[in-house]
Image (cartoon, rainbow, N blue to C red):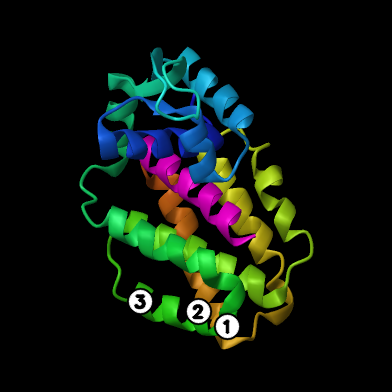
Amino acid sequence: MPITPRRMEFLQKIVSLFHQTGLPVHYAEVAQALGVSKWTAYDILKELEKQDYLHSEYVLNRFEKTPGRSVVAFRPTEKALKLLSQAGEHLPEWPAVRERLLNLFDNIKNLNPRKIKEELLEEMSQVELPVVFAAYTIALLIAHIHEINLHGAPTLPQLLQFAPKPELVLSLFAGSVVGTMVKNVKDSLNNKIFSCIHRFLEYISECSAPERKLLAGFLNEALRRSM
């Protein structure tokens, strides 16, 4: 069974937390990092365990107020580490790009969306790596959503969860934004964005499965932070 973009987001986060300490990660830590309830985090991590991406174990409590009690924590399996290694291999600049764009999403409601679009387009003219270009395109489209104050935008993450494959998640997202732009095709900025979307969709159809999962996970987190 393929890993869904939602589960990929949780897997990426728990692997990141695991690498910081080298210790098993309690589901409450993942919940806090992703802004969800600890029960939601627990359920998704257990599903990842069923897919052999995580291994659960009992460890002495270092997460809650009650000392000495054992609690359930998770560590990534070799299967998980291999998957994320494949998704990010040959992408030494990816962590910095991801962090830069996610920081943008955290503050996007306080910024000028049109100015953000212009700045992103300028930066994209220097981008050669397809995965990085695709991530910039996602950021560009999210900025556009904020500029037009798209009605129903907060429901986009829920809508995208119905797409069964990462490539469909990415294509559906791009298509949803294109539908808001057709009335202003003569706008010079929109024309540039159309060109980016065309290149983005071409790349999605040609990239590897790990790269699609990487980008779908990035999109999911970007929407969560920006909406």
Q: Quadrant of residue 54?
A: top left
Q: Label 1: few (<14), some or many (≥20) within 10 Å?
A: few
Read off the residue under disc 3: 123
Q: Earlier in the sequence, mark 2 or mark 3?
A: 2
Q: Nearer the viewer, residue 57 or 48?
A: 57
Q: What residue appears at the point 44 percent right and 64 percent down from the top-left corner?
A: 103
Residue 219 magenta-drawn? Answer: yes
Q: Which residues are magenta?
A: 209-227
Q: What residue appears at the point 35 percent right and 23 percent down from the top-left corner?
A: 75
Q: Nearer the viewer, residue 162 or 184?
A: 162
Task: Please indicate whether residue 149 sits to the left or right of residue 207 in the image.
Answer: right
* Residue 192 visible in the snapshot: yes
Task: Please indicate whether residue 35 sits to the left or right of residue 158 in the image.
Answer: left
Identity of the residue furthest to the right in this view: 151
Task: Please indicate whether residue 60 sits to the left or right of residue 48 in the image.
Answer: left
Q: How many marks?
A: 3
Read off the residue under disc 2: 116
The amino acid pointed to by label 2 is Ile
Q: Secondary structure at mark 1?
A: loop
In the rendered image, residue 62, in percent from the top left (x then y), is placed at 40, 27
In the rendered image, residue 224, in percent from the top left (x then y), is placed at 59, 52
Compared with 21, 76 (above or below) is: above
Compared with 125, 52 (above or below) is: above
Read off the residue under disc 1: 112
Compared with 155, 70 (above or below) is: above
Compared with 182, 60 (above or below) is: above
Residue 191 magenta-drawn? Answer: no
In the rendered image, residue 73, in percent from the top left (x then y), is placed at 42, 21
Q: Nearer the viewer, residue 145 or 101?
A: 101
